[in-house]
Each structure stands twice: as structure tokens, then as C-alpha cells.
Image (cartoon, rainbow, N blue to C red):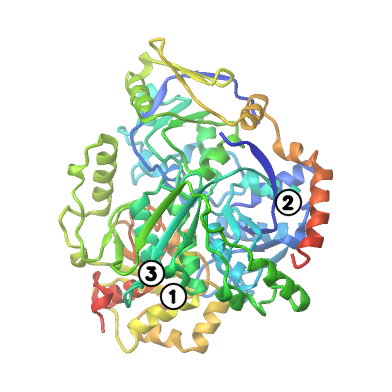
Amino acid sequence: MQPFKTLTSTPAPMKVMNVDTDMIIPKQFLKTIKRTGLGVALFSEMRYDEQGKENPDFVLNKPAYRKSEILIAGDNFGCGSSREHAPWALLDFGIRCVISTSFADIFYNNCFKNGILPITVSPEDLDKLFDDADRGSNATLTVDLEAQEIRGPDGGTVKFEIDPFRKKCLMEGLDDIGLTMAKAPKIVNYETTSKIERPWL
Amino acid sequence: MTKSSTTTIDRHLVHEVTSPQAFEGLRMTGRKVRAPEKTLAVVDHNVPTSDRSKGIEEQESRIQVETIAKNAAEFGIEYYSERDKRQGVVHVIGPEQGFTLPGTTIVCGDSHTSTHGAFGALAHGIGTSEVEHVLATQTLIQQKAKNMLVQVNGTLQGGVTAKDIALAIIGEIGTAGGTGSVIEYAGSAIEALSMEGRMTVCNMSIEGGARAGLIAPDAKTFAYLEGRPKAPKGAHWDSAVKYWETLKSDPGAHFDRVVTLDANNLPPIVSWGTSPEDVVSVLGSVPDPSLIADEVKRDSKTRALAYMGLTPGTKMTDIELDVVWIGSCTNGRIEDLRAAAKVLEGKTISSRLDYAMVVPGSGLVKEQAEAEGLDKIFINAGFLWREPGCSMCLGMNPDQLKPGQRCASTSNRNFEGRQGFKGRTHLVSPAMAAAAALAGKFVDIRTVG
């Protein structure tokens, strides 16, 4: 996993609430047995018309945002299914940070497994960030994970919270399966006790 | 922020869509499945619901199905193929086999894993990286959830069901209302529900944003499980029940949030928009988004109405339908099919429908329904009677809505494109779907004799 330290980019504003995982990556793209190559299908049904031509009104099709690495979206981003294809598609497109007032739990977890930073901000801060993003290529945001802050184009900063373990994994690009396997003695210990306490399992 | 900690996983269900990359990860790192005996694999999302004897036509679906079969064999995991009568929607077969048990932690790479909470299990969906983590370590790194209590008291009116409870709760708390929480459902109306009904309620916890939903196990839970193939037997059964009986919240337990719902006055519920929170009584009308003060919310709901091809003020009972679909992990169990068949018996579906389809949740549900003659009722009414799977709940198989088609569906999500590109979904209970099939539009099931 690619470590995440700081990121500077023009943020793309997606002023839609409840952006669900079916919108992020529709079902027809879930038949893959790979993690890569889903970027072209990101937001497919909003991004392209029925003939497969780009919809010029869709935010990521606008010249200023075609290379955005930060996405700012309305409340409850990533709701719906557990498909990790959603963060895989975002990452493959080039988005490494999503900012919203809230995220669905499974999507939020999935982001961290793929080196994407989801940031939760207050509704007031979201409005401010939307305003920055509306300025297109005239404005960039810098996301600093170490300092846990977003620095705006006019010198303003927004602080954010993050679980320390997740922060460490993201900053160092750690494989958490390896970390858990290092706890094998503890797991074995628990399994042994559990077998006595709940033999029916 | 709560701290991360490692939780062991007692039961892991695996399906073909969210597992191939996880098994590939194991292969690349030379890791094994730590507890194959705690893992059960099934194929459900991609399988056609028509005759399966000729195999799967669609190449990508076929590859995904072949991949899980190969992975299950390679890693020593029990697997139900599309030709096994125990095959079905992953959340239907877990309880059916007695694999789902009270007091366990259950995960699956599927958001509707919350279904299993109906048995007093802590059950939730995970992503593919977490599937790999569980396969490799039989644990998961978790943050402690908040507690939320949803108290449903009273008695449901005839024709009003668990699905209406679920939709009403989501309408009340919103699709982000349960974010970060585990919901405990309690109250006399929940206790009165069958296990199938409890599964319907817990299933849709995820639509309310909750990580999981659960219900304290009771005599009904134990009666459902006793004698199931994977349920404990003999002395183990007795000690298990003794332990399971202790699994309830203490009186006066602290909850971060409490929501109450009155079952007595609950009407049948229909969704009007593209989010499961967009719900209204069947006697209500399509709301007017221009009255919403918040700009982003107003735009989102306006967009939903445009997508659904509806205008504010339209009565729900005036909305005409093209398709009716009954099935899914929400409403594909035997009780759901019985409820729909009861409405359809001796009647025929409306000629304005393009078609109506019923997809049993599993091969065993199908077998039971056929033993009870329900298949004949559906077929005589004009329904298509199909093979088990997820089918049109998400349309990964050939069962999909065409652009513009409007469907009364017993599934769980009315998202844009969910049941097919530009398809329009209205979420309802099985009885409401059956009544809608007869009329070609929504009707109040309470008035159907």
C-alpha cells in the first residue's frame, strides 16, 4: 500500500448527499477478479451517457477537476454495499482523499485498506471547502495527515480527527494482516480458552 | 475516537463477488486460511435464476463462479455450488444451515450480513481486504461501536409486516442515522415477529447506516435453530442454550440513542425516491423537495424525483408499475413467499405488468414452497417461478430492469441503477408487492380481502 503523508490537489466538489456505492461503481463492474483497472468505470452512470460519451456537466469531466486527487462530497458518502471496488475505482482514477460530513462505516474502513484518507468535517467546514473547490484550478487544498489538518488556498486550516492506529498504518503504508499475524500467540491463547468456554462452536 | 482492537471471528461467510481478490492476496503472500471449518462459501450474486443445466452464459459471471469453486477447493472451504440444493443467498443459507448462532461474531464481504443479528449475533459486512484479513487470521481489527436502541411496541395491523417496520425506522433515522452504531431492536412488536421477520428487520440495519443490528435471542430463536445441520447437538446444544439465554441487555443499560416506533399505527410503507430513507405511507403522496431548506439535500431529492419520473403530490396509490419482483436476503424466505402467495391465491396479475417474478432465497426455501404448493399459486397468478439467488435485487445476473421500467420490489435498495440501468425501484413488503402485482399499481394491503 502506498503511504499517505501529504497531498496537494485541486479538490473536486460533488454536491450530492448519500452518494452510494452503486453510484461510485455500478454492479456490472463487480465481476472482475482483480483490484485494478476500475478507474474508467468510476461514477460510470453519472459520468457517461447511454452511448458511453462523457457527460460534460459531471464534475470529474470538467477541465479543472479531471486530475483531482481530492473529492469533496455531501453527507453520508459511500453508503450501501460493502464492495471494496468503490475505493479501488477511486484510487485507480487517482483520488486519494475524500472529504465529507460523514461516511458509511464499511466504505470508511475500506478506504484505509487502500491508502485512501477519508476525512470527516463539520457541515460549516464542508461548505467552506465546497466554496474553495468551486474556484476550480485557481484553488488547491493541502491535506497533511501528520498534522491532521487541511490547509486552504487562503491560509485557513481545518483540523480533523483520525484513529491513531489507522493514521500510523496509512502514513507507513502498513499491511495490517502482517501486524495481526504477529499477534498469533494471543490469538491461539484466546482460541484455546474459547474452545473450553464455548465447545459448540 | 475509540481505539482499534483485534476481535476474533466465529463465522465467516464467503461469496463469489467480494472474495476473488482476497484469495489472490493469500496466494501472493503464501498465507493459508486459518480456520476453514469456520468458513462457508456459496455462489449467489451472479447465478442465473433460469435453467442452470446449461451452465452460465455470461463469461465474466461464469469466471467469477468458477473462481470461487476453485478457491474453495484449494483452501479447503465447504462450498455450495449453483447445483447444490443448499445454495442460495448467503444470508438465507447461514441461518438455514444453523451456521449462524447466537453470541457469535459473524462477518461476510456483504453489507447485508447484519441479517444474522436476528439471532443475537454480532454480524456485519466487511470489504475484500478485511475478507482476506479474516481468512488469514480469523480476526478483524475493529473499533467499538456506539449503542442504539430501537424500541417498537404495540401490535402490527393485519398486512403490515417486518419490512414496514424496517422501512419506517430508516425513514425516521435516515440512511446515516445509525452510522458507527449497532442497533438493538426490542419491544413487544419485535418479540412478536417470527425469526424470518426479525431477519428482515436486522437485514436493513445497514440501510439505516448502522454497522449491525441485533435482537436478543429467545425461545423462538432456539426453536428455529434446533436440529439444523450445523447447529450444536446433544450436550453441546444444552450448554449452548444455557449460555444463549444470558445474551440480553441489562435492565437500565446505557444506549447512546433511543428511537421508538408505535407498531399500532404503522401503515404499509412504500419508497418513492432513490434512497431507502425516501419512504412514505401507501396512503401518502410523493413529497415536494422544493420545501427543503438545505440546498444539497434539496438538489439530491429533486434529482431523485427526476430519476424516478415522479411529480410531487402524486398519490402513491396512483403510481403504475411495469414489474413486480419478490425475493432477496431481505424478503426471500419461506414466510415471505407464504405472505405473497396468500394475497395471490386464485387471482391473476394485472395485464399492465411486463412481468412479475419470484426468486426463492435458497434451494431449500424453493423446495419447501413447492411442497406447500406455493409455486402453483405464483405460476397460476402469472408470476415467473425461478431458481434461487440474489437476482434482481442488484442485477448482476441477467435479471435486470430496462431503462424506465418501474418495479415494486421486496429488496433493500432503491439506488439509481440498482436493479438495472435507469430502472426505477419502489421498496415494499412481499404482501404489498403481491397486491401491487394484482392491481398493476400500489394498493393498501389492509384493504385487500
Residue B325's disc number: 3
Residues at badges 3 and 1 in contact (C-beta under 8 Å)? no
Residues at badges 3 and 2 in contact (C-beta under 8 Å)? no
Q: Are marks 2 and 1 on the same chain?
A: yes
Circle 2 packing at 10 Å, graded few (<14), some (14-19), many (20+), is: many
Q: In percent of the image, x 48 and y 37: which residue is there?
A: A40
Name which of mark 3 and mark 2 comes first in the sequence.
2
Left or right: B442 as drawn, with respect to B170:
left
Q: Identify the subunit bearing mark 1.
A: B
Answer above or below: position of A53 versus A121: below
Q: In percent of the image, x 67 and y 72: which residue is there?
A: B241
Q: Amino acid at mark 1?
A: Asp
Q: In percent of the image, x 81 and y 55: which residue is there?
A: A193
- Cα separation, mark 3 vs mark 2, equals 37 Å
Name which of mark 3 and mark 1 comes first in the sequence.
3
Residues at badges 2 and 1 in contact (C-beta under 8 Å)? no
Q: Which residue is mark 1?
A: B336
- Cα separation, mark 3 vs mark 1, equals 12 Å
Secondary structure state at the residue bearing disc 1: helix
Q: Identify the subunit bearing mark 3.
A: B
| Residue, far top | A155
Residue B256 or A152: which is nearer the viewer? Answer: B256
Q: Amino acid at mark 3?
A: Trp
Q: Amino acid at mark 2?
A: Gln
Circle 1 packing at 10 Å, graded few (<14), some (14-19), many (20+), is: many
| Residue, far front | B252
Residue A196 or B420: which is nearer the viewer? Answer: A196
Secondary structure state at the residue bearing disc 2: loop
Which is in the foreground here, disc 3 or disc 1? 1
Q: Which residue is mark 2?
A: B138
Q: Identify the subunit bearing mark 2.
A: B
